[in-house]
């Protein structure tokens, strides 16, 4: 994104939102494809980190939403892993040091 500038961030943000929603769709309707759902969520997070930053509320929303869906489907370990990642991001913010 740094090379192409801010004019092209909207399509990337839209792609990230599509990855996020498709990952949630897989969790809800195809729980056997949970590994694939994690890949889509990770791609959505990469795009979010690049556009908004690692500690943005947007990235934390992706993490919390995905974790919540995993909890509803009794995938507690995956939910815990993602929530730990989100908590780690909040704790390393400069104003919390």
Image (cartoon, rainbow, N blue to C red):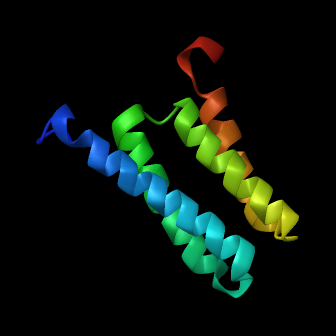
Residue 57 coordinates in the image, percent (x, y)? 57, 31
Q: Is residue 97 visible?
A: no
Residue at 63 percent of width and 84 percent of height = 33
Left or right side of 40 for 51: left
Left or right side of 6 for 30: right
Residue 43 coordinates in the image, percent (x, y)? 44, 60
Residue at 71 percent of width and 79 percent of height = 29
List the single residue furthest toward the top. 95
Q: Nearer the viewer, residue 96 or 48?
A: 48
Residue 78 coordinates in the image, percent (x, y)? 74, 65
Residue 65 coordinates in the image, percent (x, y)? 70, 50
Left or right side of 44 for 93: right
Looking at the image, residue 18 lies above or below residue 29: above
Looking at the image, residue 30 lies above or below residue 46: below
Q: Specify the quadrant that holds the C terminus.
A: top right
List the single residue furthest toward the left. 3
């Amino acid at each position: 994104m740094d090379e192409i500038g801010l004019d092209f961030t909207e399509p990337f943000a839209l792609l990230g939102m599509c990855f996020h929603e498709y990952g949630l769709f897989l969790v809800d309707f195809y729980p056997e494809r949970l590994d694939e759902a994690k890949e889509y969520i990770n791609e959505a997070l990469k795009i979010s980190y690049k556009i908004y930053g690692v500690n943005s509320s947007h990235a934390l929303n992706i993490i919390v939403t995905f974790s919540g869906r995993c909890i509803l489907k009794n995938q507690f370990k995956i939910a815990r892993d993602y929530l730990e990642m989100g908590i780690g991001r909040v704790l390393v913010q400069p104003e919390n040091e």
